[in-house]
Image: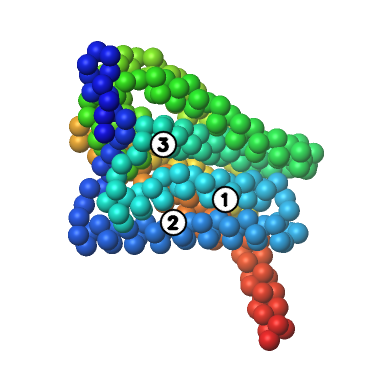
Amino acid sequence: MVTRHQFNQSVVTDFILLGFSIEGQRRFWLFIVLLIIYIATITANIFIIVIIKADPRLHKPMYFFISGLSFLELWYPSVTVPRLLWSLKTKDQHISVAGCLAQFYFHFSLGATEMYLLTAMGYDRYVAICNPLRYSVIISPSVCTMLILGSWACGFIGVIVPCLRLSKLWYCKGNGIDHYYCDFAPMIRLSCSDTAKAQNAAFFSICFVSLGCFLLTLISYACITRMIIRLSSALARRKAFSTFASHLFVVILFYGTIMFMFIRPASGDFLQFNMKVSVVPSIVTPLLNPIIYTLRNQEVIEAVFKTAHTTMAWSKGCK
């Protein structure tokens, strides 16, 4: 559906998310796989939040941040995956311009929030390892709350300008977005306007948020590594490493895929390749995060078994 611009150009009023344009059994099985992953993601993250809330032993700053990350992972995939599932099930790939801009804003705002939150978690691990005697004073409950709320505020504020720039563009070069969600590069390719300001705003936002958070996280890890090397006991080094190994793995997985997408040309066949790679931080990582933190943390595992035992005892009592 189109209207006429005053310069007699066809202006798009809705987009088509081309995404995974497959048919038949492949489409059905992709829908099933993504549905299972999405349900497992929501279930696993809710489970982590409940476990941390229920067990007093986990009422520590590190687990407060983990529950904050799990809460974020409930929303991050929810911006794109339900719409993708709907497209695969009904073959309705249309999305309004306003809906597309809203999806763009929330997807990248939540992504930026995760970067800020991972940076805060890196700082938490730095204080725990490099300044353990003052850890409870420096990372107090009020500081934890401030860091989490600050991550959300900065994440949502930082994407406002690029989103506003996109909203002011005219789209008249077709309406097919070569992605399963409203991404920046495919939308820019459809615009007939001067996109320099929009691209500059996006570039500045990416550099400030992504590189800024990544560098701060690297500094935290550099200080942690330096402190671990100084430890005389091999047992002490292993124990110190285990306290931030899970976070390190999550950071490598999240930033690795994002940087891989941005260092490749955003045109031609690379857009299709980037779309497939983007599944990792958008869909896979939100499921892996609670699994990683659970499997590598003895206190969480014990809390899981304790909760399961309590639930079973309660269910038997009800009978």
Q: Are marks 2 and 3 in contact (CB under 8 Å)?
A: no
Asked if marks 1 and 3 touch (Cβ < 8 Å), the reply is: no
In-front residue for pair 82/309: 82
Q: Which residue is mark 3?
A: 99
Which badge, 1 or 2, comes first in the chain's sequence?
A: 2
User: Residue under circle 2?
Assistant: 38
Q: Earlier in the sequence, mark 2 or mark 3?
A: 2
Lower position in the chain sequence, tag 1 or tag 3:
1
In the displayed structure, would residue 149 be above or below residue 38?
Answer: above
Q: Kindly state the secondary structure of the residue where label 1 is placed.
A: helix
Q: Residue at x 70, y 57 (%)?
A: 53
Q: Which residue is mark 1?
A: 70
Q: Please state the horizontal and vertical placement of residue 128, each as a whole percent of the image.
A: 69, 43
Locate the C terminus by quadrant: bottom right
Q: Gap between marks 1 and 3, in whole Å?
A: 26 Å
Gap between marks 2 and 3, in whole Å? 21 Å
Q: Percent from the top left, x then y, of residue 192? A: 26, 19
Residue 151 falls in image quadrant? top right
**Location of residue 19 (image quadrant):** top left
